[in-house]
Amino acid sequence: MTAIELLKRYKSFIAYAFFGVCTTLVNLLSYHLFYVALGVPNVPSTLIAWLLAVLFAYVTNKLWVFDSKSWAFTVVIPELIKFLVCRIAIGVLDVGIMWFAVDKMQWNAMAWKLISNVIVIVLNYVASKLVIFVKKEK
C-alpha cells in the first residue's frame, strides 16, 4: 500500500488526531488563561475551556474530519443536537475528573487536565464516528 493510499484510508483518523490536538490546545490554553492567569475557580475555568473547545471541535469535525459539508437545517440541527448531547455527557465526566483530582485530591491541575483530555478525546471520537456524523448509505 502506498503512502497516498494510507493517507486516504486513514484520512478521518489523521484529521481527527490533528484537530484533536488543536482542540486540546484550545481547552488547555483556555483553562490556563482562566484558572492560572485570571484566578477563576477550577470548575468554572473547566466549563469555559470545555465550551470553547466544543465550539471549535464541532466546526472542525463537521467540515474536515467527517466531511459533513451540508449546512441545511435538516442536517445541522439533528447533528448539532447529537454533538452537544454527547459532548455535554463527556464534558460532565471531564468536570468530574477535574473536581475530584484537583479540588478533592489536590493533585496537579495541569497534569490532570491533560489526562482528562486524553480520555475525553477518545470518547468524543467514538461518539462522533458512531453516533453524530454517521454517513448514510446512498
Image: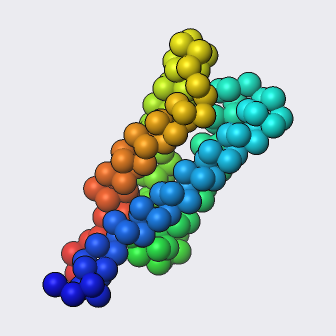
Q: Quadrant of the C terminus?
A: bottom left
Q: State the residue in front, 78 or 92.
A: 92
Q: State the residue in front, 36 or 27.
A: 36
Left or right placement of residue 108 versus residue 63 in this view: right
Image height check: is 5 above or below 39? below
Q: Residue furthest left?
A: 1
Residue 39 coordinates in the image, percent (x, y): 81, 29
Quadrant hosting residue 135: bottom left
Left or right placement of residue 4 versus residue 69 in this view: left
Which residue: 49% across, 42% down? 117
Left or right placement of residue 118 versus residue 22 in this view: left
Residue 131 coordinates in the image, percent (x, y): 32, 54
Left or right placement of residue 111 versus residue 34 in this view: left
Quadrant hosting residue 98: top right
Which residue: 55% across, 55% down? 23
Q: How many numbered callouts? A: 0
Which residue: 58% across, 25% down? 108
Can residue 48 be seen here? The reply is: no
Residue 28 coordinates in the image, percent (x, y): 62, 45
Q: Residue furthest top?
A: 104
Image height check: is 127 above or below 96? below
Residue 116 coordinates in the image, percent (x, y): 47, 36
Image height check: is 9 above or below 115? below
Q: Quadrant of the N terminus?
A: bottom left
Q: State the residue in front, 106 or 48.
A: 106
Which residue: 54% across, 13% down? 105
Q: State the residue in front, 26 or 62.
A: 26
Can residue 107 be seen here? The reply is: yes
